[in-house]
Image (spheres, grey):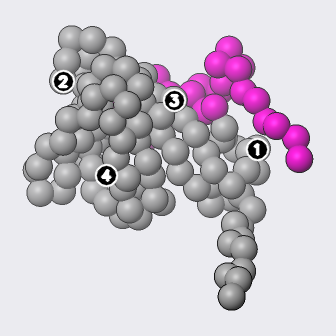
């Protein structure tokens, strides 16, 4: 099996709906991508945000630098700092905001609905 490598200089920029002051790039993902998992690197400027919306598939956020505030459907807030992670199940309502005066970066990892179906090895007895 080959090793797929994406250099940051080759990452493809994109603009997801409902994101303001956020500069995401696909490390693995995009229209022609056929892998099982997508990985995006999102840079949030101070005040940058993603509007309250449901996540389409199970998603993992890992903050690499700075701090980001996640707001849940009930208005509860959760601050993620460097190397903190959050797992959101399908349909979880969330908003993300950089409430600091410094830029923040976050990896967004999720399955690729267009990718190959994953298969688990059979259980052995």
Kindly identify which numbered label has been placed on residue 120. none
Kindly identify which numbered label has been placed on residue 99. 2
The answer to whether marks 2 and 1 mark residues whose Cβ atoms lie closer than 8 Å is: no
Is the residue 44 above or below the residue 14 in the image?
above
The answer to whether marks 4 and 1 mark residues whose Cβ atoms lie closer than 8 Å is: no
Stretch of the chain drawn in magenta: 1-27
Which mark lies nearer to you, 2 or 1? 2
Which residue has dot 4 on it?
53
The residue most toward the right is: 1
| Circle 3 Cα neighbour tier, 10 Å, few/some/many (<14 / 14–19 / ≥20) | many
The residue most toward the left is: 75
Disc 3/disc 2 C-alpha distance (Å) = 19 Å
Q: Is residue 16 magenta?
A: yes
Secondary element at tag 2: loop
Residue 43 position within the rendered picture, expressed as x and y whole percent measured from the top left: 42, 22
Which residue has dot 3 on it?
41
Q: Measuring 33% from the left and 26% from the top, which residue is drawn there?
A: 82
């Amino acid at each position: 099996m080959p090793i797929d490598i994406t250099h940051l200089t080759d990452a493809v920029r994109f603009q997801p709906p409902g994101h303001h002051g956020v500069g995401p790039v696909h490390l693995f993902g995009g229209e022609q991508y056929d892998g099982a998992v997508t990985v995006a690197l999102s840079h949030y400027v101070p005040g940058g945000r993603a509007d309250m919306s449901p996540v389409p598939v199970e998603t993992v956020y890992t903050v690499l630098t700075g701090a980001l505030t996640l707001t849940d459907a009930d208005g509860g807030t959760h601050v993620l700092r460097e190397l903190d992670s959050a797992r959101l199940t399908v349909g979880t309502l969330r908003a993300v905001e950089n409430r600091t005066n410094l830029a923040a970066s976050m990896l967004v990892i999720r399955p690729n609905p267009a990718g190959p179906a994953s298969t688990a090895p059979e259980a052995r007895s």
